[in-house]
Amino acid sequence: DAPGQIPSERLREEYETLVEQVRAARTAYYQQDAPELSDAEYDALYRRLEDIETLHPEIVANDSPTQEVGGEASAAFSPVTHGARMYSLEDLFSEDELRTWFLRTAGTLTAGRPEAAPAWTVEVKIDGLAVNLRYREGRLVQAATRGDGRVGEDVTQNVRTIADVPQTLTGKGWPAEFEVRGEVFMSSAAFAELNAQRAEEGLPPFANPRNAAAGSLRQKDPAVTARRPLSMILHGVGAGPDLGVASQHEAYDALAAWGLPVSPYTRLVEGADEAALADVVAVIEEYGRRRHELIHEIDGIVVKADAFADQRLLGHTSRVPRWAAAFKYPPEEVHTLLLDILVSV
Ligand code: NAD
């Protein structure tokens, strides 16, 4: 099947099967915290779906998974309508895709503005689940999961049990009311300890730290969450007045000064040309090597236009910001006990 041609019956069938498979995988992953596919398997299905839609835009359904932020608020929690939408991220699976995205985005920022000097934050992509926090008069008043990006789940009492998340802000200069968002995760050390403890108690282990974090946060009883070693790191601002700063990296500095947790791994890269791209690639390679020395699992590196003015200029699609993208590392070889047993028989 080529672009412009009427899709064959076989392709239509493949497309419909893919939509169903992606939907089912999302339900297992976001609602049940029990994925049935590996992330790489999911990414391959999703990519094939995108490829078919690029080839045949006329068959894209309005409710195709490519048009929506994955996930849905579960009825087990009270719904929370986010003050500002929460988005997903565009994935880049190779250096070529990164190059295309970076030079195109930088080109948009500099087109007709040769004096423009874009900068980028290069951040680790924490493998956890996104949560929005609302502070009023310096106090945490609400925490909600991303859900479908518009409506999330009220997990305020659960988030109150996370030691990294201050109940009360310190410092000065914070707005009367504002929102920030970030990732709730389990550190690699805490995950290993929790699984060892579960093995001793005869409980099934969690498949990975992301799964453990999501399953631990989305508990009806906050006392269960309180016993789970969760952490949080912020990676964005939500609804509210600006924080008195003009860029992502300055926002992180302000949040840190108010006692909020931000990543120690974020880097700033300046420029819009090949040299700037090479700097981004160097950070990706460095964290690729150091991946297992970090305090938490990462599944990629996020590159973001730093200036809020640049972010506004680039805007969003219905699913992702155009001012950020996630470079995904290739999947690592997985060695499970089961695999070893299978290989040895
Ligand atoms: P995503 O997880 O790839 O990227 C978006 C999210 O990244 C944001 O919502 C945010 O929470 C998070 N993030 C972490 N660090 C960040 C940072 N520094 N800056 C900004 N955001 C940061 O996208 P998604 O839509 O949440 O999920 C899609 C991915 O989830 C897939 O690629 C796959 O890995 C996984 N998934 C797996 C299955 C499965 O069956 N295994 C099913 C659905 C989704």
Image: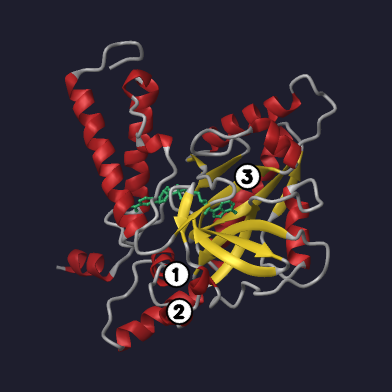
Residue type at mark 3?
Answer: Val
Q: Compared with residue 223, is residue 103 higher up or lower down, i.e. above or below?
A: above
Residue 73, picture quadrant: bottom left
Residue at point 77% right, 73% down? 170
Camera-side mark, 2 or 1: 1
Residue 200 as seen in the image, left or right of residue 179: left
Residue at point 44% right, 75% down? 191
Q: Which of 64 and 136 is in front in this view?
A: 136
Camera-side mark, 2 or 3: 2
Q: How far apart are marks 2 and 3 (CA)?
A: 31 Å
Pointer 2 residue: 228
Residue at point 63% right, 44% down? 303
Sequence-first disc among 2 and 1: 1
Quarter of the image that includes the C terminus: bottom left
Q: What is the crowding at mark 2: few (fewer than 14 residues within 10 Å), some, or many (at least 20)?
A: many
Pointer 1 residue: 217
Secondary structure found at label 3: strand
x%, y% of residue 299?
49, 55
Q: Does the residue labelled 1 lie within 8 Å of ligand 1?
A: no
x%, y% of residue 93?
47, 40
Secondary structure found at label 1: helix
Quarter of the image that includes the N terminus: top left
- Residue 303's label in the rendered image is 3
Camera-side mark, 3 or 1: 1
Residue at point 25% right, 17% down? 7
Residue 309, picture quadrant: top right
The answer to whether residue 264 of the structure is visible from this angle is no
Q: Do the residues labelled 3 and 1 touch (CB within 8 Å)?
A: no
Residue 252 as seen in the image, left or right of residue 201: right
Residue type at mark 2?
Answer: Arg
